[in-house]
Image (tube, rainbow, N blue to C red):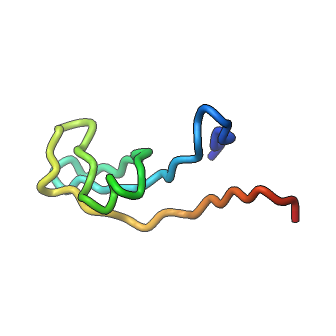
Amino acid sequence: MAFPAPTENRPAMPEYVFYCSPCKKSFTAIMTVAAHDKGVSPCPKCGKKKDVEKRIAMAYVVTSKKS
């Protein structure tokens, strides 16, 4: 999975994984941490939020220093 590099005009945004029970499909959403803390993203297929669950995804970390 390729992630776009953050730039001065486009900061890095976390990508979250969700699962819609009625559709039986996983989907990802790029959203701020604050938006994620408020709740789930609506399913892109059916538009529902009620039966959408948060799932654990891999982490992508960007640092300003070279290791």
In the rendered picture of this protein, how many numbered marks are placed on residues?
Answer: 0
Q: Nearer the viewer, residue 53 or 31?
A: 31
Q: Residue at x 69, y 56 (%)?
A: 62
53 vs 7: above or below = below
On the image, the x and y values in percent for residue 57 come to 48, 63
Q: Nearer the viewer, residue 46 or 50?
A: 50
On the image, the x and y values in percent for residue 36 come to 34, 57
Quarter of the image containing the C terminus? bottom right
51 vs 42: above or below = below
**Identity of the residue furthest to the right in this view:** 67
Q: Nearer the viewer, residue 51 or 9?
A: 9
Seen in the image, is 3 located left or right of residue 20?
right
On the image, the x and y values in percent for residue 52 come to 21, 56
**Identity of the residue furthest to the top in this view:** 9
Q: Residue at x 15, y 57 (%)?
A: 51
The image quarter containing residue 45 is: top left
**Identity of the residue furthest to the front in this view:** 8
Seen in the image, is 43 located left or right of residue 10?
left
Q: Residue at x 67, y 37 (%)?
A: 7
Seen in the image, is 35 located left or right of residue 65?
left
On the image, the x and y values in percent for residue 11 come to 58, 42
